[in-house]
Amino acid sequence: MATLNESQSGKAVKGRTKKPAPRVDLTAMVDLMFLLTTFFMLTTSLGSLNAADIAKPDKTDPAVVENYPESRTMTILLGKNNKAVCYMGTIEKADMHIISVANIQKEISKNEKLVAETHQQNPAKYMIVIIKPAKTAKFQNFVDVIDEMKIANIKSYAIDDDHIAEKEITFMKMNGI
């Protein structure tokens, strides 16, 4: 690989010959390094980002209807201090309760079981979750809830930060969320 080149000519100084410093030729090593680098770049795959795909409906499209089946819809309102308000069904019949964002997984699984029992374990009748982050909510809490949707394998969830009802706002203000 590397070769050691020594020149044969040396000048005599008072009876001794001066040896020149040896010169190392690393051309072959450099070529090998570039070949290996190229090989590993072409044969390995780079890590891909694990980003969540989030799409919000187009507000200008009149075909978009926001009617959700009451019996299988869960709403999560994100507020301040790592707290959330959850309820099943519509706002008119809502039994709102406050939970910590850290405990949101338990609430999701409890409501999933409720929906499954209500619809006789019909796989076509899965739970729909509406996530409503308030202006006081932390972005980290929003990301945590989206992660929980992926972990709990929720097939359908929506982000609706534009339509927080007056009853929801009043409940959140009364409870300091």
Image (spheres, rainbow, N blue to C red):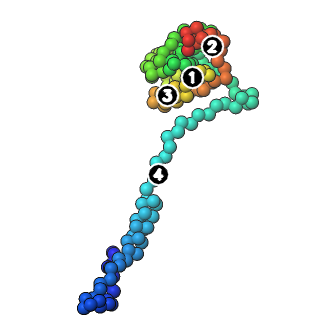
Distance between mark 3 and mark 1 Cα atoms:
12 Å
Query: Which amino acid, by three-letter code, is at mark 4?
Result: Leu
Precedes in sequence: disc 2 or disc 1: 1
- Which residue is the site of mark 1? 137
Residue occupied by mark 2: 169
Mark 3 / mark 4, whichever is N-terminal: 4
Task: Check residue 46 in the rendering and tell me which mark sits there, or answer none.
Answer: 4
Kind of residue at disc 2: Ile
Mark 1 or mark 3, which is nearer the start of the sequence?
Answer: 1
Front: mark 2 or 4? 2
Q: Residue at x 66, y 12 (%)?
A: 166
Side of 65 where 132 appears, left or right: left
Query: Does residue 137 appear anywhere in the picture?
Result: yes
Residue at 31%, 89% in the rendered image: 10
Which one is closest to the eye, mark 1 or mark 4? Answer: 1
Amino acid type at circle 1 is: Ala
Q: Which mark is residue 144?
A: 3
Q: Quadrant of residue 58?
A: top right
